[in-house]
Image (spheres, rainbow, N blue to C red):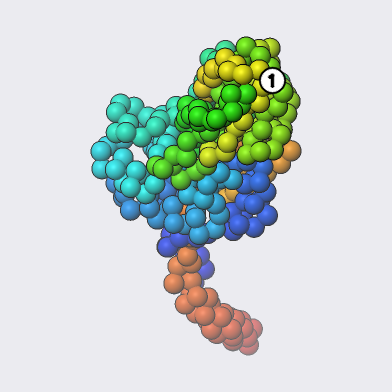
Amino acid sequence: MILLPVTAPPVVAEWDDDNWLWNIIGPERLELGDEFGCHGFEGIDVREENWVIEQCRDYLTEFTDASRWGSQPVSFGHPNGPIDANTAQSISDAGFSIVGDMIEGDSNGLHVVQRLTSLEKGQTNLTALENAEQDSLVSIYWIARWHDVNIREDKDAISLLTSQQVWFTTWGEWHGHKISGESFDRILTVDPQVSTYRISTLGNSSWSVPGTALFEWSETPTSIQFDGEEALIIPSSQRHLITGIRPVDGGAYVTAPPGSMIDFIFESQDVSISHTPQTTFNGLHHSVSVVGHHVTNLHDWSSDFHQSPLRFTWLIERPAALEMDWRLPVLAVAVLISTPIAIKWVVTRDKARSDE
């Protein structure tokens, strides 16, 4: 009797696309305020193959914008350990300015975000979350699947985070907000009852992220206007970045987009007014971003967070495509041909034996 193998190992070839980036989930996450960055190509070490850095960027931008604040990605997930100069240069040349999240040594001019803890069930350092420093960015690692194992999120950690007075943000948004908050410039006007400020439009930034400053004055303004319109009042409970003002005793937190004109209108002339850049939006204690690593399937990575107030930095990794071994169809045809022959042979043999 003829015996033929009917299985063969799959072979990895070329690359696949994650259609959730542009289909339903990607647009929803983008509208909520999430960010899409890059992590390279599945199974390839970017330190050994720098070409995947630019290719990952092109793969991502073919299907989605990186953020509501800008189309080009700015955040890149680097393997744990040091960044060599060549890799850092390739990251920078591709337009990325932020790397994370367990970086050692010199960052070679890139802005580094370090991981505080993980969102994996049983692995979260709750004490670290409870004791986060004021105005810090808490970056939390998340991965939905490791090889064939599904990872569950730590619900106690999520409950703790959502109970805190923190800003839910992303790597790129946090970084851009900080830069904008440091860029309020006073504009000279002829009206002594009006003080005008503007956030400088930063020529070296591809994103237009609002910034926050705490303005304090000797007299409460009768009106605060953005580009000639009354500014929106931001509630103290607001934990996602929007523009407007949040009044406090003796002043207000002012969050405005780059390039907009902010007019403070007073009853008196030459009122004393000062401003202090704010790292954290809306006077909140600190900032939190959950960071999805090695995201090859956005549905799997985000499925447990549809109703969550958390915001995510998704580090997208182009998935490897599984190509069937070319021997399989050949073997299938061989089986189809040989099976009737084998059956006929067995029947003929059995009949011959019965006639003996």
Q: Secondary structure at mark 1?
A: loop
Q: Position of residue 83 (x, y in %)?
A: 31, 35
In the rendered view, does 343 fall on the left or right side of 238?
left
Q: Is residue 244 above or below residue 61?
A: above
Front residue of 277/116: it is: 277
Q: Is residue 152 above or below residue 206?
A: above
| Residue type of the residue flagged with mark 1 | Glu
Residue at image location 62% in from the left, 46% down from the top: 30
Specify the farthest residue to the left.
85
Residue at image mark 1: 267
Residue at 53% x, 14% y: name it: 133
Residue drawn at point x = 55 percent, y = 30 percent: 190
Quick check: can you spot residue 232?
A: yes
Where residue 306 appears, as percent x and y from the top left, is 71, 41
Is residue 346 positioned above or below 304 on the image?
Answer: below
Q: Can residue 184 be seen in this snapshot?
A: no
